[in-house]
Amino acid sequence: MRPLEGIRTLQVDGDGAARTLSVGVGSQTDVDVVPREPRVLPVHPTAGEPVAELRIYADDARGLVTRLSQGREQPRPADAGELAR
């Protein structure tokens, strides 16, 4: 687990290409997600600027990492209905 400063749920650290968004629960994170390239995430603290890393807390950290590692190879349940039409 990685502690965050203060009790803020969303915290942006760094600047430019090295920006990191931390989404904490109980002021802690336990999963680091590093996309292939910086991404713009639709949350206010990033001010529309891309982030190079996302740090989050997950109840099932292993399950989340497994799912993220699979990428978009399998459709998500919401997508499955659209594909069946």
Image (spheres, helix red, strand yellow):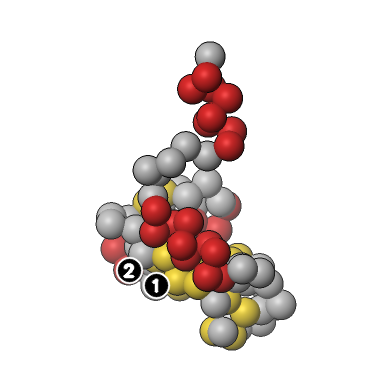
- From what the image shows, is residue 78 above or below residue 81? below
Q: Is residue 16 visible?
A: no
In the shown orientation, is residue 55 left or right of residue 5?
left
Contact, mark 1 vs mark 2 (Cβ under 8 Å): yes
Packing grade of label 1 (10 A; few <14, some 14-19, many >=20) is few
Image location (x, y in percent) of residue 12: 50, 68
In the displayed structure image, the side of residue 73 where residue 44 appears, left or right: right
- Residue sticking out furthest to the top: 85
Residue topped by disc 2 = 18
Seen from the viewer's position, the closer of residues 39 and 75 is: 75
Give left or right: position of 18 versus 23.
Answer: left
Q: Position of residue 25 (x, y in %)?
A: 68, 72
Amino acid at circle 1: Gly
Q: Which residue is nearer to you in this view: 59 or 54?
A: 59
The vertical placement of 75 against 5, above or below, is above
Q: Is residue 61 left or right of residue 34?
A: right
